[in-house]
Amino acid sequence: MNVLLVPIGSHGDVHPFIGIGLALRARGHRVRVIVNPFFGSLVQQAGLDLIPIGAAEDYTRLAGNPDLWKPTKGSQVVLAGIGQFFRVVYEAIVANQVEGDTVVVASTLALGARVAEEHRKIPTVTVHLQPSILRSYTDPPKLPGMWLGKNVPRWAMAMQWKLLDNLIVDPMAKPPLNSFRKELGLAPVRGILREYIHSPRRVIGMWPEWFAPTQQDWPRQVRLAGFPLYDESGVSALSPELAEFLKAGPPPVAFTFGSAMWHAHDLLEQSARACTLLGCRGLLLTRHRDHVPSRLPAGVKHVDFAPFSELLPHCQALVHHGGIGTASQGMRAGLPQIILPHAHDQLDNATRMSRLGVARMIQPKRYKSDLIAQTLADLMGDGAVNASCRAVAGKFAGAQSMSVACDLVENAVRSE
């Protein structure tokens, strides 16, 4: 098949699609990635063909907006920013399709792919990386600013979903989407996050059943594949300096707050101080060197990036923002985790991990060195937490998420 992958988002959104792309290519398919050129080198280093859309500045402008990391404003920033990609995604798909032999594998926010699916009848599979995007009354996601839960009356949840759609989501996403659809002769749509983001052909959830079980009120075309876990292993490697650091002392605590977090100086400073208070070694992971304190205490090191599958087995705990990719790598490594959820899917991921007994949350405003150190000490010294971490890590044994995802993509086309 001619496969066009369309990830929209940060490194955490692009990585899984590269993993899927490599697995599909290994099966003999031609794979190309339609993505912002900010991620061009990442795609090309993995050996996949790149189809750039937009300008790198489009991504950096969005990622640099401090409101992106605020609980309720973050989603509005995303909704306001994705409109610029509707047309370019559609045009890139149309220009690179092979008639009768193309399948599009598109991320949650790649709505231009949904338009191409409808207008040009191009088989499309939607890939959601986190369960929070799927609405449910039986097991509702935990979202910032919303009162959702198994004990919340159904009418109250329904009212909140309706207000979210009618007052925020549709007013921001519908105008540019329907304006473009009108040019193509398509009727207007509504319920963008409620229904439209899901391809009617197939939706793949990239997480396992034990993390977020399939719900009866999810769209009937949803199938779960498991965590993707691609992290550039085999493309990027641990630097000699990092390898030497890991060998030189006890396992460190790893701190990372997401590739799209462009305002992490205070978080990293408090993290470094916490290591001093706890008397442990620490590793600060960020691509933004200007966020790193100018003077780090002894035993604390900064690294731009390292594949988590290679790094985390050498660590004793993980502190992060709650992104699904980081969270899954930490669970696979069997590490106790501290999560400070800011926005988007992070609160839901943190809640699910807390239920599993492998993580505790600290609200970003309370992220101070003394609380970090105390929480880390409690986590690492808690026998029940460590037992839960081992049990959850065991669930990853034998998982074949990429193979399952490839099967689902191929079968979605064969069943046409």
Image (cartoon, grey):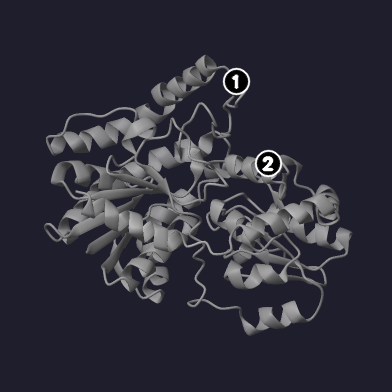
Residue in the foreground of this view, choosing between 241 and 142: 142
Q: At label 2, which amino acid type do we have?
A: Arg
Q: Secondary structure at mark 1?
A: loop
Q: Is residue 134 left or right of residue 153?
A: left
Proximity of marks 1 and 2: CB atoms separated by less than 8 Å: no
Q: Which residue is mark 1?
A: 152
Outermost residue toward the top? 155
Residue 397 lies, with reference to residue 217, above or below; the image says below
Residue in the foreground of this view, choosing between 237 and 398: 398
Where's residue 112, x and y in %? 27, 46
Sequence order check, earlier mark of 1 and 2: 1
Quarter occupied by the N terminus? bottom left
Where's residue 342, x and y in %? 61, 42
Q: Say whether residue 205 is visible.
A: yes
Where's residue 339, x and y in %? 68, 48
Numbered label attached to residue 73: none
Q: Which residue is mark 2?
A: 355
Locate residue 293: give its quadrant.
Answer: bottom right
Residue in the foreground of this view, choosing between 83 and 327: 327
Q: Residue at x 23, y 53 (%)?
A: 413
Q: At label 1, which amino acid type do we have?
A: Val
Q: Residue at x 66, y 67 (%)?
A: 312
